[in-house]
Image (tube, coloured by chain):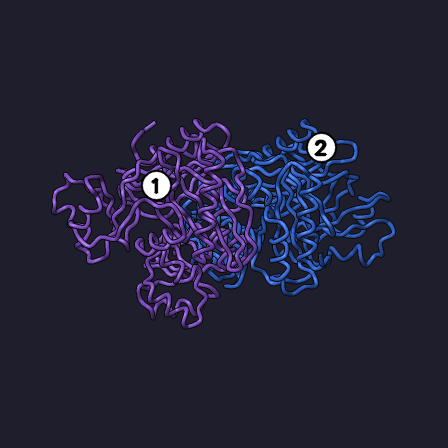
Chain colours: A blue, B purple
Amino acid sequence: MVGGGQLARMTQPAAVALGVRLKVLAASPEESAAQVVNDPVVADEKSLADLRAFAAGCDVLTFDHEHVPPAHLRALEADGVLVRPGSAALLHAQDKGVMRERLTSLGIPCPRWAVVSGPDDVAAFAAGGEVVLKTTRGGYDGKGVWLVSGDTPAEVVAEPFRAGVPVLAEERVDYARELSAVVARSPHGQAVAYPVVESVQRDGICVEVVAPAPGLSSSLAVEAQRLALTVASSLGVVGVLAVELFETTDGRLLVNELAMRPHNSGHWSIDGAVTSQFENHLRAVLDLPLGSPAARAPYTVMVNVLGGDLPEVYPTYRHIMARDPGLKVHWYGKGVRPGRKVGHVTAYGSDLDDLRERTWHAADYIRGDIDE
Amino acid sequence: MVGGGQLARMTQPAAVALGVRLKVLAASPEESAAQVVNDPVVADEKSLADLRAFAAGCDVLTFDHEHVPPAHLRALEADGVLVRPGSAALLHAQDKGVMRERLTSLGIPCPRWAVVSGPDDVAAFAAGGEVVLKTTRGGYDGKGVWLVSGDTPAEVVAEPFRAGVPVLAEERVDYARELSAVVARSPHGQAVAYPVVESVQRDGICVEVVAPAPGLSSSLAVEAQRLALTVASSLGVVGVLAVELFETTDGRLLVNELAMRPHNSGHWSIDGAVTSQFENHLRAVLDLPLGSPAARAPYTVMVNVLGGDLPEVYPTYRHIMARDPGLKVHWYGKGVRPGRKVGHVTAYGSDLDDLRERTWHAADYIRGDIDE
């Protein structure tokens, strides 16, 4: 697995159970995943030579992020390396312009969009309304995203274009909430769909996921799973695919983003599903039969723990464990910085209000926002 | 954790979630746990110098077996190393004579027993009945155990005494089944008790565990948990304690064996309990608050996968995954040898017959005993 973040870290328990030796290419020996695997390789994920050396010790190459340059992936494939998902599929999670073009050609509902080359294009696209601008490559967690309107100062509208990366303009969607449909797909085409979840964002960062999405009609749930399975098979995805969706106020689904790796909206599955997204990602990239994605409880709530003002989390961590013996804590081994994802907590059961109260209390307490 | 077997291996997923860095002292870099932790230490667990060097890099020392010499543990404690469980407690899991003496003094029901020094003592103890002889130290999985009677040839009765280790004689108990009560206890005395399970043995090796023990009366279940909690607190155990019990045909409980570490009879808890025995062992030895030991399903069945005649398990492994997407497989990364524990499978739900059929099918298929 290229990338030493928490996604690779959380893949290790699945590898331990499956009897798979997980190798990790990390940027430093202290990265989240590097702490928990045998012999992590510290190397540069942007260097083809480093990637080639790493791949030589692996049966199959997969990723905990989308940052490996597409040309390097194609070079590895030309070398004969099994790259999963393959470069042709992964490109749609690396370049939002390519993604929009392809989804539209497949008839998948998307927000109105256009690739724009400057402020004049933006104004023409906006036609007086609000527009979301995204760099087509390199953004994550709210970075590389701007909301602009006719009132936005010209220098702000110009900002997305400064990096020299093509910019995608999208209509600002009037959505009721955000959903996520996570699926896993094998090389020979077996696929499983997890229950569709509701994902709550603050400042562009996912903070809460509820599985399944409360009150979602079964027709929309099936439609979201169908969309995700269609994208997975049409693009030839191998591994986990997360399709982030808007549920509009008028009851439609529009695709917001794609990720081709275990995704924050699937972390609930570690404690809440028969087979976690991490295990199914491994099974898929190794072409093993997939495990059941069924939920184990009526509801599972996952809340991200973001770094706050408390540099030392250990005392608060003990408190939340003592308060709630049924809470599942997942710690990423990362230093605390304000706003950084340093862990998550999960609770499951039938009383959604209770699960939300418990998970949010824990996250807020660790962050230092509350002290009792 | 001293010891690189599957117990240390299965502790790693718990460490990953808790944000704990698990260090392992293994006998070889290819041992089960050494494959899945960062920078395993290959050293000799019988060498005090090696243990001292290993302990210098740890906040607390714990074990995946009972084989570290008691004198070494006392020396480490004298050095100031936090050894959990401590040497004084662990001795009761290392020496069956010490264990019987102490349990009897605590009023804990045991089979009739005596430490014997030769065949004449055995004959006197037997008084014409059947006797189980056990070396007081070093036995496991049926090794170091003999069943003798008046008809047993003299050279067989003499065999247990050849190692020069004191021998324990016990009455052969007329039991209906074997149970196990697993508890975890913290240094400050917090303790949790898992549901009491039924454990099925063949040739002295655990092959199946059902949680909770089917049809066990609530009074016997509570009595078994009470016994285990009493032993844990009286002996000052820190970490997981497994108390293996006989349920006699006349409805009594007798203590058979003690283990002070995660135990085969607790593996079901990985998939079947809110908090696995491995996570609670770590929480306990780190003096973190303990997690809920509650079962997540009406029944969980675990079946050990023993090596059979098939040296290569991968093809069968794929088959059992494809046959049963709800089955949880746990692979230990060990080479296959006949009779060796190489993994286990777990299934949970409400239909006990179905769970048994699925888990046994998988284990028998991987072993090569059936081929469809």
Residue A62 picture location, percent across and down = 50, 48
Which residue is more in the foreground, B79 or B267? B79
Mark 2–mark 1 distance (CA, rounded to whole Å) = 46 Å
Amino acid at circle 2: Gly
Amino acid at circle 1: Cys
Q: Is residue B214 left or right of residue B176?
A: right
Determine the image quadrant of residue B56: bottom left
Chain letter of the residue carrying label 2: A
Q: Are marks 2 and 1 on the same chain?
A: no
Of the two numbered discs 2 and 1 in the rendering, the one whose residue sits closer to the viewer = 1
Determine whether label 2 and label 1 are within 8 Å by CB: no
Chain letter of the residue carrying label 1: B
Residue lying at 73% horizontally and 58% vertically, measured from the top left: A369
Residue lying at 73% horizontally and 55% vertically, measured from the top left: A161
Residue lying at 19% horizontally and 39% vertically, measured from the top left: B128
- Which secondary structure lies at badge 1? strand
Label 2 belongs to which residue? A215
Q: Is residue A39 left or right of residue A101?
A: left
Label 1 belongs to which residue? B206
